[in-house]
Amino acid sequence: MDHTQQKRKWRRRLRKARSVRRRLRAVSDRPRLSVNRSLKHISVQVIDDRQGCTLAAASDLEPSLREELAGKSKTERAAAVGAVIAQRATAAGVTAVAFDRGRYLYHGRVKALADAAREGGLKF
């Protein structure tokens, strides 16, 4: 893959993510639950776009979670991160969020994280 193809690929990914965020901002005044997924790991943040700050965050890379999640599948780790972000968000006073899946399809790990966050008490 040469440099121009790679640039095109990143621009396409960024355009997809921005498209999702644009639709979220148009309809919601709630904080945004933003998901970032890599090949091995998953992280999530609750972001207040009005103030431009992160209210709560969780990742499967955190030392406290890493030991607990050792040996589990990526989907199981995503569900555990969803439960943790629900606890941290409610502790920060957030009960309703807008789910920002970014450029990722609502499927697999992203869906497992969302379902676990809903079970933990977040509304979206």
Image (cartoon, rainbow, N blue to C red):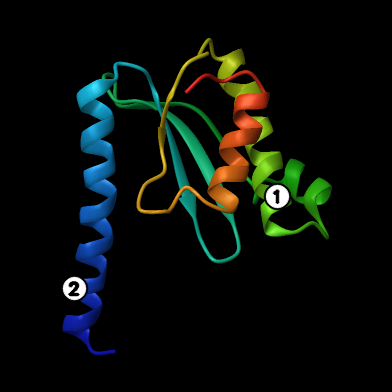
The residue positioned 29% from the left and 49% from the top of the image is: 17
Q: Disc 2 designates what residue?
A: 8
Q: What is the quadrant of residue 65 in the picture? A: top right
Neighbour tally class for label 1: few under 14, some 14-19, many 20 plus, Cα within 10 Å? many
The residue positioned 21% from the left and 36% from the top of the image is: 22
The residue positioned 78% from the left and 50% from the top of the image is: 69
92 lies left or right of 97: right
Q: What is the quadrant of residue 54 in the picture? A: top left
Residue most toward the top? 93
Identify residue type, mark 1: Arg
Q: What is the quadrant of residue 57 in the picture? A: top right
Query: Compared to 36, does 8 lie above or below?
Result: below
Query: Compared to 16, does 59 lie above or below?
Result: above
Along the line of sight, the residue nearer the viewer: 5 or 19: 19
The residue positioned 56% from the left and 36% from the top of the image is: 114
67 lies left or right of 104: right
Query: Compared to 11, does 102 lie above or below?
Result: above
Q: Which mark is first along the chain, 2 or 1?
A: 2
Q: Secondary structure at mark 1?
A: helix
Neighbour tally class for label 2: few under 14, some 14-19, many 20 plus, Cα within 10 Å? few
Q: CA distance from mark 1 to mark 2?
A: 31 Å
Q: Disc 1 designates what residue?
A: 77
Residue 36 in percent (x, y) is at 46, 49
Along the line of sight, the residue nearer the viewer: 19 or 86: 19
Residue 38 in percent (x, y) is at 51, 61
Along the line of sight, the residue nearer the viewer: 66 or 9: 9
Query: Compared to 101, does 27 lie above or below?
Result: above
Specify whether residue 112 is in view.
yes
Residue 53 in percent (x, y) is at 36, 26
Identify residue type, mark 2: Arg
